[in-house]
Amino acid sequence: SHGARIIHVDIMAEEFGRTAAPDLCLWGDARETLNDLLDALHGRTQTLFAGRMDYVAEIAPRLSEWRRGADARLTSRDRPINVARLVHELNEIMPEDGVLVADAGFAAHWTGLIYDTKTAGRGYVTDRGLASIGYGLPGAIGASLGAPDKVVVAVTGDGGFNMTLGDLETARRVGCDPIVVVINNAASGYIKALQHAMYEGHYQSSDLTDMNYAKIAEAMGCRGVRIEDPEDLNATIKNAIRERSGPTVIDVVVTRDPAGMLPAVDSRTVKIKKGDRIA
């Protein structure tokens, strides 16, 4: 937020100041640095916590208010499918110790807004901010190999999935079983939505071919399911979690309307000017 003080902890000193001007830079391993900070704060934690009690008390009511305001989208029966409904279903279905891997772009944008981790630990893994779309599938392979007993679900856009879908062969070869949910809007959606907002319906190189990724997955020896009705989301995702045996691709047909792609703003009415950041 505006005026917030920034403390940047990083094991790589060259990262300091690269994207922001922190008030304090701490060079070291994140875990060991946090342990040192806990030691430094010993005896003051209760006082510090007490000073934040008013803010803590606001959180639950404000979350409830947000949930009421977002309910129409979270439970939407629209066809094509509303991405909020997809992420809401994942939120309800994912096991507490499951791992959700979010590709960059829309996948991270939507899941970061709506998806809730249930327990401490790395239950949500993304590279948001690095703009490296294509991360979803290989990231899920890494998570599956690192935590072979856990359910791993990747959420990726069709643009990102196009870049690395050959790694379905990798997943088969190394014997892991991630579930890959493709947000399929036949576009580089984040780019198209911003072009819609800034250039009043004019687009450049943001449309993609409408591909059936379920059939592509099947042709590569994986399981594939294509979903066009939001009422099929719950059972399909549950079945994929229950019957994990190799990679599964769930191809979810979502809105192609660039005015309805952004989760935080309605780009039919928002006015964007050069330099603005809306996500």
Image (cartoon, rainbow, N blue to C red):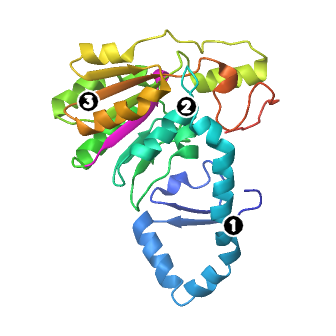
* Label 3: how many Cα within 10 Å (few below 14, some 14–19, many 20+): many
Question: Could you say whether the residue bearing mark 2 is in a helix, strand or loop?
Answer: helix
Q: Give the residue at mark 1.
A: 58
Q: Range of the magenta residues?
A: 150-159
Residue 247's label in the rendered image is 3
Q: Picture coordinates of residue 37 (x, y %)?
A: 50, 77
Q: Callout 1, which amino acid?
A: Glu
Q: Picture coordinates of residue 82 (x, y %)?
A: 57, 28
Q: Nearer the viewer, residue 234 or 199?
A: 234
What number of labels is visible? 3
- Give the Cα separation between the discs numbered 1 and 3: 42 Å
Q: Give the residue at mark 2.
A: 83
- The rendered magenta stretch, by its main secondary structure, is classed as strand
Q: Callout 2, which amino acid?
A: Val
Tell whether 216 sits left or right of 251.
left
Residue at 23% in and 28% down: 170
Q: Picture coordinates of residue 197 (x, y %)?
A: 75, 24
- Residue 131 seen in render: no
Question: Could you say whether the residue bearing mark 3 is in a helix, strand or loop?
Answer: loop
- Give the Cα separation between the discs numbered 3 and 2: 22 Å
- Give the Cα separation between the discs numbered 2 and 1: 28 Å
Sequence-wise, the earlier of marks 3 and 2 is 2
Query: Where is the N terminus found, in terms of image quarters?
Result: bottom right
Q: Nearer the viewer, residue 92 or 125?
A: 92
Q: Picture coordinates of residue 22 (x, y %)?
A: 65, 60
Tell whether 231 sits left or right of 249.
right
Q: Nearer the viewer, residue 97 or 45?
A: 97
* Quadrant in which residue 7 is drawn: bottom right
Question: Could you say whether the residue bearing mark 1 is in a helix, strand or loop?
Answer: helix
Mark in the foreground, 1 or 3: 1
Q: Callout 3, which amino acid?
A: Pro
